[in-house]
Amino acid sequence: MELSVELARALYPSGDPVHGFDHVLRVYFLAQHIGKEEGADLDIVRAAALLHDAKGADPRGEANEREVHHLLSAEFAGDILLGLGWQAEKIAAVQHCIRSHRYRAQDEPPMTIEAKCLFDADKLDVLGAIGAARTTAYSAQADQPFYSEPSRRFLETGEHEPGEAHSAYHEYLFKLRFVHKRLLTDTGKAIASQRDAFLRQYFEQLQAECRGER
């Protein structure tokens, strides 16, 4: 039995503008697009995309769960797909996609083309216009400003001075400007090139406006 969008939607909490179902749906459509171009098994890609953040990803939850949400979601996906009658081999393929999708976790890198499609689609959702919006929303959730001037220490090492904010601009410098280099498929890389250019221009303009330079 196929995992439907409607069934998956019910698994996610409402009111999360960063890792809620809006994000999942964008990843779902983008992963399918990449998967078609790359010759992936779309059944696996679709299921993995719909379930990749199903457990522990909500930043309003426990911090320790967020760190292992890829593992929690993979285990949860196994239960869901088993209940839908999926074969063990396909369930394992979906679980690998989910376990390997997290940017900061390198314990299980994406090995299959399906896992690479999910990884790229998920990362592309922090680039471009969506990336700017999501990063700003995440800063608001964390009670951080959308812009504050980074310290010299942060610029040189990525470490904050005591009391220094971690604004959306800090997150761009710390992570987002490097994401396009991590993509794995030719299709994903092509999309990332345009989105990265937009995001870079956006944050350069944001900094200039906040400094009163433009």
Image (tube, rainbow, N blue to C red):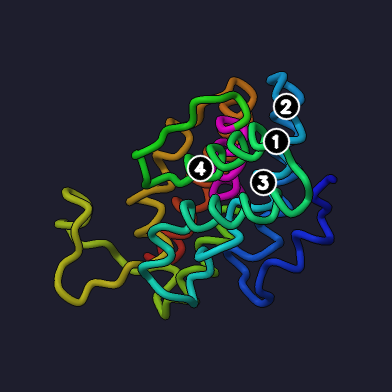
State which region is magenta: 115-129
**Mark 1 and mark 3: span between their CA atoms?**
8 Å
Task: Check residue 101 in the rendering and tell me which mark sits there, or answer none.
Answer: 4
Which numbered mark, 4 or 2, is in the foreground of this view? 2
Quarter of the figure with the N terminus: top right
Q: Earlier in the sequence, mark 3 or mark 2?
A: 2
Q: Earlier in the sequence, mark 4 or mark 2?
A: 2
**Mark 4 and mark 2: span between their CA atoms?**
17 Å
Q: Earlier in the sequence, mark 4 or mark 3?
A: 3
Q: Which residue is mark 2?
A: 41
**Mark 4 and mark 3: span between their CA atoms?**
10 Å
Dominant secondary structure of the magenta stretch? helix
Mark 2 secondary-structure assignment:
loop
Mark 1 secondary-structure assignment:
helix
**Mark 4 and mark 1: span between their CA atoms?**
14 Å
Q: Earlier in the sequence, mark 1 or mark 3?
A: 1
Q: Which residue is mark 1?
A: 44
**Mark 2 and mark 1: span between their CA atoms?**
6 Å
Compared across the picture, whether 205 is left or right of 20 comes to: left
Task: Check residue 49 in the rendering and tell me which mark sits there, or answer none.
Answer: 3
Mark 2 and mark 1 in contact? Answer it, CB < 8 Å. Answer: yes
Q: Is residue 212 above or below residue 45?
A: below
- Please tell me in which quadrant of the rendered image residue 187 appears: top right
Mark 4 secondary-structure assignment:
loop
In the image, 110 versus 145, the foreground residue is 110
Compared across the picture, whether 143 is left or right of 76 comes to: left
Mark 3 secondary-structure assignment:
helix
